[in-house]
Image: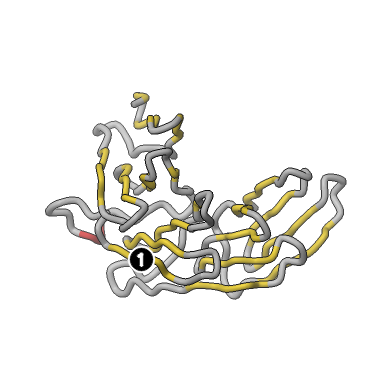
Amino acid sequence: AIAAIDENNNVYCSTANRVLKISANGQQLWQGHTDNANFGVPVIKGDFVYVGGGQLWALKVSDGHSIWGKTYNPGILDPRGQFTSPVVNDNGTLFAVCGRRNFAFSADGAIIYQADSLELQGEWLSTTPVRDVDMPLLLQNGLCVYCFKDSLRAGRSDNGRLAWAFKGDDNGSPGPPASVGNDVFVVCGRSVY
């Protein structure tokens, strides 16, 4: 199970096809059901908890009831169709990747955009899926940084278009990135960038 903690020290766990809310003293407060496996870290924002997996789900923080779920079938190139955990900005916009397509959703689940623009020039699409368990980073300048299996890629939050990409070196794939302001840090092989 992968967990997140809210300001009241309640723990939100995503596992199999459910999300659990557990109090700081270990009491289960609710169990929210989803129709598919959840792989990502739950993200708590306001009155909602969001979780990625076979679908992107929004559940009520108060009782775990499902508000909406979004599915995307990327087709033959990547039939898994797993959403990353989203990142949510201060306006409530959610950013996530499914297959090789990046999405922005409003808090009510409406699609703001979906784009294939994180692909690199001349790259064969099926070679570099996004890692399902890595949550995107949202930088202060509005770029969303996604961790692919072979690279980090930043997309513009207003339209999803590729802003930059970092391939690292031959000693390994980039790990999950961290940021301070607009600076991004990542371990790749034995090097820190």
- Residue sitting farthest toward the front: 91
Q: Using the image as rendered, state which of residue 25 and residue 104 is in the foreground.
A: 104
Identify the residue at image location x=65%, y=49%. 3
- Quadrant of residue 189 in the image? top left
- Residue sitting farthest toward the top: 191
- Quadrant of residue 75 in the image? bottom left
The image quadrant where one finds the C terminus is top left
Q: Give the residue pinned by disc 1.
A: 113
Report the label total: 1
Amino acid type of the residue that numbered disc 1 sits on in the rendered structure: Tyr
Identify the residue at image location x=44%, y=57%. 96
Identify the residue at image location x=29%, y=31%. 171
Residue 113 relative to residue 51: left or right: left
Residue 41 relative to residue 8: left or right: left
Measured as percent of width and height from the top left, residue 109 is found at 51, 70
Q: Is residue 149 above or below residue 98?
A: above
Identify the residue at image location x=14%, y=52%. 121
Measured as percent of width and height from the top left, residue 106 is found at 49, 64
